[in-house]
Image (cartoon, grey):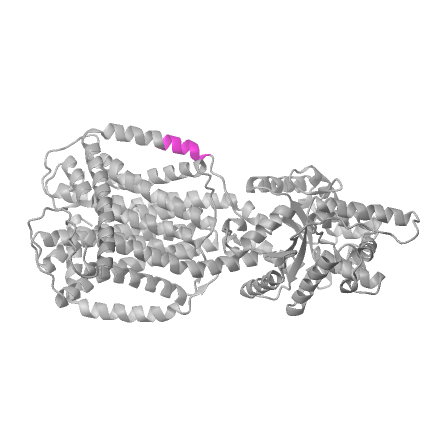
Amino acid sequence: MSFQTSQTFWERWSDFVTRRSRPILAVILTLTVFFTFCLFRTRVGTDFSDFHVKDSNDLINTIQYGFDEGSYLYIVFESGSDKSLLTPELLKQQFRVMQKIKENFNVRTRSIVEAIDEGLRRNKGKSILDVTDYSEIGEAILALSGPRTVVDLEKVSSHFLSNPEAIDFYTKFRVAASVAGAGGGGKLSFDIPFVKAIRAYVQLEAKYTLDEEKEIHASIRDIAESSSTPELKLYAISSEVVIYDVDKQVRKNAILMGLILLFVDIFFLWGEFRKGKEIFLVLFILATSCIWTFGMASLLGVRLSFLHIIALPILLGVGIDNSFVFGRRLSEERKKGKVFSEAIRTTFKETGLGIFLATITTFIAFLSSALTSSVAGIASFNLLVALSMAICLVITITLQGAIRMEAEKRFPSPLPSPSKGEGEKDSLPSHRGGWSGLIQVKAIFDRIYLYLNKIADGFANLGSRGVTSHRRLILMVSAVFIIIALISSLGIETEFDYGIFLKKGMPTYLAERREVKYFGRSRAGYILIEGDVENPVLLEKMKLLEDKMVKYPHVEKVLGRANVDSINDLIYKMRYSLPAGASVKEIFDIITNSEETGNHVLDESYRELASHMVRKKGDHYDGLLMTFFLEETDANKTQAICDALEKDMKSLKFNEIPGIHTRIGGGLISFHLEQKLYFRNFVESFFITLVMNFIVILAAWRKFWQSLVAVAPIIVAVILTLGFMPIFNIKLNLMNVCLGSIIVGLGDDYPIHITERFAEGRRKGLGKLEAARNALSSLGSNIMACAMTSIFGFGAACVLAMPVAESFGILISISLFFVFVASIFILPVLLIGRKNNSVAAPAMTCREDIC
């Protein structure tokens, strides 16, 4: 389509929306009311499964529902004084808390205090609530910690008792057990080992939905925290509680973020236009776009997570950019003495294509990112933003004409004097009379905006001087920064864990800090074996694999062996051997049906233990689960361990066992294992969206070099941002992976509008240099206002009170600033090219005039 055809289209569109302004407004208002009611159906809720790939979710669900390995909540008991948590009075408080939890909820619990109570009932016929002497408690513990449970005692001391105090705890009882076994007579006397912290486990049954699990976990936490005393402090932590708090923060801070965005938008709108009518009009357009977007999302059943809320500053950023460009150009046309209808017609003709390209490229950027993402949560976010861009475009190009025409009919504005030059700024109005307080505030805002305007003009002047006499210097300095950023970007690290959502002030933050302090950041990983598992060869290979895991770094060790839970442990404890031809099914049946105590320390039966290790379907067993525990590791170390597991399983020929297939992952290590996928999606989405936008711009402008130049500031900004991340220790996380598509989507607005104004100058007969300088002088403050609203808007994402949101807001703000600077300095240099054609170019009527 030629440029002349494009202008004709926008002129006709202007005629349509201004002549049919009332019906258009009636339709839009009706739909807005409808979508407003839809907002009341909006669901806010984060689900970590939305940020896993499908295979990981399948594995997690299989482990959770097939082996009872999910939805754990950890309660940390901490002594608030120098008293050990094993003193009778503090044990009683812990026991009452566990009783209260079990009375109020249908849960399973695992705790040392309950095991001690069971030991007392068996050996003394009394409850822990009836005991005042620690020696009786010690005897109960001794009864639970027999010589066959040394490994269990080691494991429990690591995961249930704070270290290093736990060492003293189990050492004394091992000695006591040896004395008793050697025939030591008389009543044993026990000193109270000092234990600062104890951890208990609470597990829900697998019948609840995620929302129910979050509510129950939060209620259990409330019970625990309400039971805290100065001597016994309680904390509760789980992934469900974390996302419960995240959702609560989102609901609260989404309103705060909206208010901040509103304030920022009003500030820059007032500074740019100084007219209440103009401010109201733009805010009405933005509000309508927001209502349509989130109302339609609610209608489509989209569940809004913490990530979806970020669509708000993106939508407002694009919407206000378009409004700035349209409103400023309309003001310029009016200053030339044109009547309103002719001014708005010219405005549509000159800015319509730019607004269309700026919005549609953003739409394409997020749509292509959604289609290429393999993570449902990221794809859903990108689709929501793409939807918002489509709505923003429709609302903008209809309301800009219709509502302005209706406002002009009812409140006609006087024809401005044409004496002011194009791009000349209004002076600050004087303030007399009225409310002195408001006048002073208004004066302060005016003064601030005046300074910002001077800064914007300063940038524009620097850009103009740069394209005049420092083009080579600009390119050389840019090349140096790009090279430094590329080298720095090689040090980018990733961070995928629920800890990135925690920040001081959140209820779960202190609980997570206490858990890590006393018990480390231990993570469970899983090896799932499915198929024909009733095979003695498989069990032998599992033993060999466990032996090989001793050599792995960062795998927890117990008595010189890798800390691995598997069915082999239970077979060993029950003193079974597996001779040739042994019926594995019969042995599994004995274990899974036995109510004998299998873990004396926690008083768990073999049946309870087996429920986490073996799965039965009908008359046959079809699944085994091996659980291994990792010390605090990063994603790269976790990936290395899992790679080593796959390699050893291959060398042991697991894949050659008939009817067997295996998977590794599950639990919190899933995020670690998926980090490469996230980074790959990050790179893919950036390049795909960049290429797609380039194609769209090329199709509209029909000039290869011009289109390539328009995306250059985005490429520069992304490279500089990636180089910025390692320097300031900002890691790639769940939200930052959206960086590429957001910068491509939002960042192309500035170069598109500047390039459009440059092309307009060329059509009017200006040389390249004059056209570039005219574009900078006329759009400098406008583009800076657009950039500042988006920068402050994304900065407002920091109020979501999560580290992951803070780093996201910082990165996007910095990236948009880089795009703005590149658009002011690098873009004009590239537009002029090697030849500085300062001779006026003849006016032309098609896009071929862009050189």
Residue 486 magenta-drawn? yes
User: Residue 172 colored magenta?
Assistant: no
Locate the C terminus and report the quarter of the image it occupies: top left
Whole-percent x and y of residue 415?
8, 58
Pick the front one: 547 or 120:
120
At horizontal 52% and vertical 57% (from top left) the residue drawn is: 243
Between 828 and 164, the residue placed more toward the observer is 164
Q: Quadrant of residue 761?
A: top left
Q: Position of residue 458 (x, y in %)?
A: 22, 39
In-image side of 207 versus 798 (left or right): right
Q: To which quarter of the image does residue 398 belong?
A: bottom left
Q: Is residue 657 above or below residue 209?
A: above
Residue 41 position within the rendered picture, expressed as x and y whole percent measured from the top left: 42, 69
Left or right: 562 as drawn, with respect to 297: right
Front residue (pair 626, 469): 469
Compared to residue 140, the image places residue 781 above or below, namely above
In x, y percent, where is residue 168? 76, 45
- The residue at the point 16 percent across, 50 percent down is 428
Magenta span: helix, strand or loop, mainly? helix
Instruction: Determine whether 486 is above or below 581 in the image.
Output: above
Q: Which residues are magenta?
A: 482-490
Q: Say whether residue 616 is visible.
A: no
